[in-house]
Amino acid sequence: MLSQIPINLEKVAKKDLDKEILRVAIIAELDATSFYEQLASMTESENLKKVLLEVAREEKTHIGEFQALLLKEDKEQEQELAKGKAEVDELTGN
């Protein structure tokens, strides 16, 4: 994503705007997490690697914060997330 919003938020219905903003924020945090982890895997500097991986962990916390709020705002998302977890548990025997 790297600083580009993947949808035109001006075309989103006002009642759905906050949910879409949260989804965009989650995408940005996932992108940042992946970016920092990729950079960490490329460097030979242990100090830089430690810092990059710590920043990536912080981005994962941000994902959790945005997801928690999204699940409060979008009950259908909450239900579908639970269904997805149940399907994975069934497929993997957990």
Image (cartoon, helix red, strand yellow):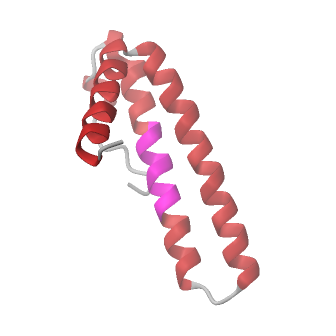
Residue nearest the observer in this picture, 76 or 87? 87
What is the tally of numbered marks visible in this picture?
A: 0
Q: Does the magenta stretch include residue 37?
A: no
Instruction: Establish if 76 lies above or below 1.
Output: above
Which region shows up in magenta?
A: 25-34
From this view, report whether residue 61 is shown above or below residue 33.
above
Quadrant of the rendered structure where residue 24 is?
A: top left
Residue drawn at the location 61% of the way across and 42% of the way down: 61
- Point 59% across, 49% down: residue: 59
Classified by dominant secondary structure, the portion drawn in magenta counts as helix
Which quadrant holds the N terminus? bottom left
Q: Position of residue 36 (x, y in %)?
A: 55, 66
66 or 87: nearer the eye?
Answer: 87
Expressed as whole percent of the image width and height from the top left, the position of residue 13 reads: 28, 15
- Say whether residue 60 is left or right of residue 19: right
Q: Which image quadrant for residue 81?
A: top left
Indicate whether residue 28 is drawn in magenta. yes
Could you tell whether 42 is left or right of 70 in the image? right
